Amino acid sequence: MSQRIPVTELTSSFRGRATDALADSQLRTNFRVAMDSLMQKRSDAFPDEDEREGLRELGNQIKARALSRLPDLLEQLEAKLTENGVHVHWAETTEEANRIVHTIIESKQGSQVVKGKSMVSEEMEMNDYLAERDIECLESDMGEYIVQLDGEKPSHIIMPAIHKNRRQVSKLFHNKLGVDETDDVNELIQIGRRTLRKKFLEADVGVSGVNFAIAETGTLLLVENEGNGRMSTTVPPVHVAVTGIEKVVANLRDVVPLLSLLTRSALGQPITTYVNMISGPRKADELDGPEEVHLVLLDNGRSGAFADAQLRQTLNCIRCGACMNHCPVYTRVGGHTYGEVYPGPIGKIVTPHMVGLDHVPDHPSASSLCGACGEVCPVKIPIPELLQRLRQENVKSPEEPPVVKGSGAKYSRKERALWRIWATLNSRPSLYKGLLWAATRFGKLTPGKLGPWTDNHTAPIPARRSLHDLAKAHLNAQTKSGGQP
Amino acid sequence: MSELFYDAAPNATRVAPARPAPRAYPAKPTEVTLFGTCVLDLFFPEAGLDAIRLLEREGIRVHFPQQQSCCGQPAWTSGYADEARDVARSQLTVLDNGLPVVVPSGSCAGMFRQHYREVFAEEPATLKRVEDLASRTFELTEFLLHVCKVEWRDLGQPTQVALHTSCSARREMNTHLHARELLGKLDKVERLDHDHESECCGFGGTFSVRMPEVSGAMVLDKTRALRNSGAVEMVTADGGCLLNINGALDKQKQAFRGRHLASFLWERISGEGAS
């Protein structure tokens, strides 16, 4: 039922980019090695299976409960943050969020921004937006710094530069920074750090993401391993945090299991090197910290997912990346193949709500539904089930009411008609048996080429007698010979 | 360590529930229904017949309703829910005789056990029958191991096999554990591990034709891993994976092949040559 795609469409489609990625042996080795190591680290971090499964169930329930009270918790969060002296802004679109951030920077006559790692800022394409307005926005996370230096996008939500190995990074630093090439990872990190240290001190504004926004206390929790998050949020005079509305949780107790799930699922760490809990700007008697703190709460399609009970589970996500680490498709094609900010299994279920299914029509199909993602998800998002649901939305006829933005992108009258015929054949025994009769009788006439199937396989030849036929003969013989063998 | 989390979170919803209790298995019945699956029906009918023979050897009378066809999975996973529901409804009727249903394919068994609930989520009246079918459905290896509690004498020559389990079977039905244990009962069969054993073979139904490049890369890796395991052959309890892996091996002009576990088991315990 799948059509061969014309070569001209290849590079702009998932399949086209996947084909390129699959031919890049260096890229494939980089991903395979990295993902194998991450899977092992996660596995080692959860030595007790019962504890792991109990904790995942707990994580799921905490997120489900938080989402069931989402509007209330967001209001509580805003009230508490405002009380703490944090300015809260709401943005429905990425354009609005960018405008808010830009207005804050402008009000300080700022020209330099230093940024801790934030996927929401990637969603906003904040760097480009600010660059167009003559504001330099420098990534301070080492991986983000590397991809920014190379004019790329992150290929993984936790390890943005995981598609590069040390030699490729060394070459990049040599070309862009004029330093000597080196194979020493520590030296490479020091090169990056020396550049960044200066920037922290010069920056007018620091931008960061948020891992958990705690409603009860008005606390923004941020985990990181490099210290760049703490620098970005404490050294510049203004700190702007950007986050999605689904990151709100009820209270600090809820964070304990979620945090443990996050760090163990992501990198196999019992806890990250830094856990920042930001509860407001510098107070009169404090020696450091920003004078001003802002939080931008971004919707960008999340409320669309929220509106559907099944699709709402997408918003459970705590962005650990375990689903991509364990995905046999992601492992082979890498993050850039997905062509969007969020790659891998979570990207396939979250992106349609942000950009519309019609912009990512191949996303739901790019899965064998093997279930590895759902098995490791720390908050038990049933990712395969949601992919199946998105496939339904994808093939909906334009007359049916859309639930997901851009649904019906893969609607085809011909394909629907074929499935109708398939359903009729398989739900009427006489027709099905007629089909079996024909297939077994004319099986030898199976053509040698069967569309894309024969790219990787020989054509399957139906057996000369079906199981229906063999079973009937066998069971009849058993009955005649007295029933039991 | 786990206690720390739960002590820190004392209210009711935060008590970590125990994992679902392992399935309680009934005593060995005298009669069962075999759901042959559409893939075995057309491409590996001998495997279905060997499944019948394995069950009959345990003294069970096997029924094979001639009205059965497909579980509906191809349409369901392709997003054609109405079409899947039509087929599923017809199978619900065919299998409505109260007998245990044994399925020689993990992903089809998983369809009955797990996914019919989603297929009929909007039809409360049908859900009762869905739950009834789910409670009576057993994947073949699970049934042989836990319901029949088979004890076998291995009549074959010493051999080495690699075991591939379908993803849905592994994740929904624990089939890898059942199949391993069954193979363990054959004292002249050595099971060899292969690289990335739990990874998908790349079939995924229509995935293999919608994304042939990615699917092809996956099956290439899988066939390499299987060949490099040192095993004489691969065995699997899932027709879809078998179709994928054997079709790819044939295309690669490799001599190595996979076989349905039912056929392998029957050959070992009956002493008959490959059927």
Image (cartoon, coloured by chain):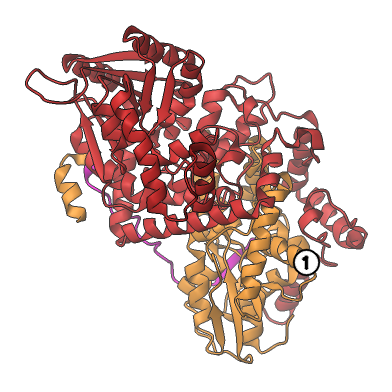
Chain colours: A red, B orange
- Residue B224 x/y as whole percent: 66, 68
Question: For this rendering, which residue is in front, B139 or B204?
Answer: B204
| Main SS category, magenta section | loop
Q: Is residue A462 above or below residue A387?
A: below
Instruction: Look at the image and give the residue range highlighted in magenta.
Output: B14-36
Is B16 magenta? The answer is yes
Q: Is residue A90 left or right of residue B183?
A: left
Q: Which image quadrant: the C terminus of chain A?
A: bottom right
Q: Determine which quarter of the picture holds residue A72.
A: top left
Q: Is residue B177 above or below residue A421?
A: below
Residue B127 in sight here = no
**Residue located beneath label 1 in the image:** B252
Label 1, residues with CA under 10 Å away: few <14, some 14-19, many ≥20: some
A170 vs A215, nearest the viewer? A170
Left or right relative to A310: residue B211: right
**Between A142 and A352, which is closer to the camera in this rendering?**
A142
Residue A476: give x, y in percent of width and height: 75, 73
User: Residue shown at 46%/22% (left/top)?
Assistant: A126
Amino acid of disc 1? Gln
Residue drawn at (43%, 17%) of the image: A135
Say above or below: A213 vs B210. above
Please report, as a chain letter, where disc 1 is located: B
Circle 1: element type: loop
